[in-house]
Amino acid sequence: MTGCDTGTDRGSRTGRILTFEMSLDPNSEEMIFVPYLRIDYRQRTKTYIESTSSRALVEFGTYYSSSTDSFWSTAEAIFYVLLVILILILIIKTQVMLSKPTLSQD
């Protein structure tokens, strides 16, 4: 908390909402953009602080974002390959079961 001089009435200026934002950069060697800390300040006078007994509320938030375009295209390709393999296994199992000799009731 830092004090600020508002003439004869001294008050305080504090952070009200602090937000940390970070996102990944797939084209950079460090793989990260420069993070940002966004601070919304609240300033109160000494008179207001003394006349109210309310506590100052502070909100903290962290936001992380990343581009997932390449991940989903790879995941989709893997899904279709596994689907084709599963269908082939089902066809082969069905063919094997149908080609087994059956017992006759003679």
Image (cartoon, rainbow, N blue to C red):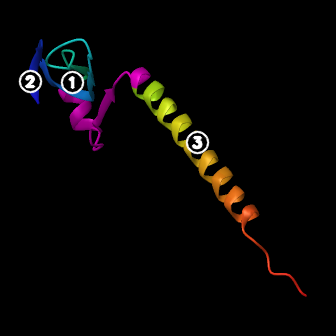
Q: Which residues are magenta?
A: 43-70
Label 1 Cα crowd, 10 Å radius (few <14 / some 14-19 / many 20+) = some
The reply to whether dot 2 and dot 1 touch (C-beta < 8 Å) is no
Camera-side mark, 3 or 2: 3
Q: Residue 83 shows which numbered tag?
A: 3
The answer to whether residue 29 is left or right of residue 49 is left
Residue 22 lies in quadrant: top left
Residue placed at 14% from the left, 16% from the top?
Answer: 29
Depicted 82 relative to depicted 25: above or below: below
Question: Residue pushed farthest right?
Answer: 106
Q: Residues within 10 Å of mark 3 (few under 14, many from 20)?
A: few
Q: Is residue 47 magenta?
A: yes
Residue bearing mark 1: 45
Residue sitting at x 73%, y 62%:
99
The residue closer to the viewer here, 7 or 30, is 30
* Disc 2 residue type (three-letter): Gly
- Mark 3 or mark 2, which has the lower sequence index? 2
Total marks shown come to 3
How far from the left and from the top, in percent, is residue 9?
14, 20
Instruction: Say which residue label 2 marks.
Output: 3
Looking at the image, is mark 2 or mark 1 nearer the viewer?
2
Proximity of marks 3 and 2: CB atoms separated by less than 8 Å: no
Say whether residue 74 is magenta: no
Question: Vertical placement of 105 versus 90: above or below?
Answer: below
- The numbered mark at residue 80 is none
Viewer-proximal residue, 15 or 54? 15
